[in-house]
Amino acid sequence: MFFTYKALKDSQIVTGKIETNSEKDAVQLLKGKHLFPIEIKKAQRAMSFSIGSYFNHVNFNDIVDLTRQLAIMLNAGLTLIDCLDILKKQIVKPALYKLVDDIDKSIRSGKSLSESLSEYHQYFSNLYIALIKSGEASGKMSDILLKLSDNLEKQRAFQGKIKGALIYPVIVIAGMFVVMFVMVTFVVPKLLDLYKDFNIDLPLPTKILIFVSNFSLTFWPIYIPSLFVGMGFLKRYFATKTGKRVLDKFLLRTPVIKNVIKMSVLVDSTRTLSILIGSGVSILEAMAIIIETTNNVIFQDAFISINKQVEKGVSLGQAMTNEGVFPPILVQMTTVGEQTGHLDDTLMRIAVYFEMESELAVKTLTTLIEPLILVVLGVGVGFLVMAVITPIYNLTNSFN
């Protein structure tokens, strides 16, 4: 991989780009050239929009399958090097083959598996790397990988259920907006041209429809690009810390949606914490990983506060109670798990409970969205019918 650097040489700052396996190797290489590194960054790759590169990139499903295959082979007694050799012979996707080949080369050069994976944070999370480190330290790599692969597969199945439940409403809403745009911009103007030759007073719905239709017909080349620009601006804003906080607060205060968001966060955090503690990772290290892997800023702040309280000697259950954002059942079960010494098992059981609750929340959301869509469609169709048919009815009455 490539790194850009800024370094001192003879009291002057020089910049450049070098190719090496890791940031540590880059530092050593620069020192070998009598350069004192000030700043080293991984070079950003140029974006490629080709269809081939889109389908060739390594995705979450590839990592899940790779982990499961590696776990099965290690559990069968094969060495890590043999496992990687077998995987390379089976892999068809070029990007995935390169990833496994790079990891293989890194391990053959003397690095551990966790050190090799840490160079690819875009594919392997901090949870993944922490569990691999735990497996290396305990000598139970195969057991850790089996547990990790189970977790990844549950995560994939859970995400699939949520996407499957929401795909129908999304498609219907998108189709509704497309039909409305085509009707208002291209179809309705031709129907309304019929009224221009008649000297009749048009009703208010028809006047509104004529205004919207004329505006769409005149300015659609402007407002469609403006819509995409606005969406891009909002996407960049919500990617910032402030924008993310605003969005997360809004979602957690929105009826029905807040249950889906809350349960999704609790499923991931409790399951992750259970696996980390069960693998021998300390609570403080586990909480640090939870903080980094939690996407919701509100819960992330709560976990940061919990981590600080645990550092001061407060129990995990009591620290959760002090935050007030966690459901009572989680606080109670965590306290029971700490008292009985089976915190990992208790958290895994509560994770299963939250997963069932999240599925119920998603079903409730989709159940409410479907009639709401029908109501909106009915109102829209009714308005179009009233705006188009009412003038014809008035015109017929005037002839009588």
Image (cartoon, helix red, strand yellow):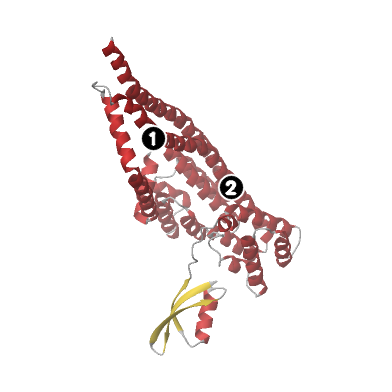
Q: Residue at x 30, y 38 (%)?
A: 215
The quarter of the displayed image where residue 104 is located: bottom right
Horizontal side of residue 287 vs 68, given as left or right: left
Mark 2–mark 1 distance (CA, rounded to whole Å): 43 Å
The quarter of the displayed image where residue 74 is located: bottom right
Q: Which mark is residue 186?
A: 1
The N terminus: image quadrant: bottom right
Q: Secondary structure at mark 2?
A: helix
> Closest to the observer: 395 or 68?
395
Q: Residue furthest top?
A: 400
Residue 204: give x, y in percent of width and height. 26, 25
Q: Residues within 10 Å of mark 1 (few under 14, many from 20)?
A: some
The C terminus: image quadrant: top left
The answer to whether residue 86 shows anywhere in this view is yes
Q: Residue furthest front?
A: 197
Dot 1 amino acid type: Phe
Q: Which mark is residue 301?
A: none
State if disc 1 and disc 2 touch (CB < 8 Å): no
Dot 2 amino acid type: Arg
- Per the image, the residue denoted by label 2 is 156
Q: Residue at x 34, y 48 (%)?
A: 226
The answer to whether residue 341 shows anywhere in this view is no
Residue 261: give x, y in percent of width and height. 45, 43
Asked if 341 appears above or below 253 in the picture, the reply is: below
Q: Residue furthest right?
A: 77
Horizontal side of residue 333 vs 113, given as left or right: left
Q: Secondary structure at mark 1?
A: helix
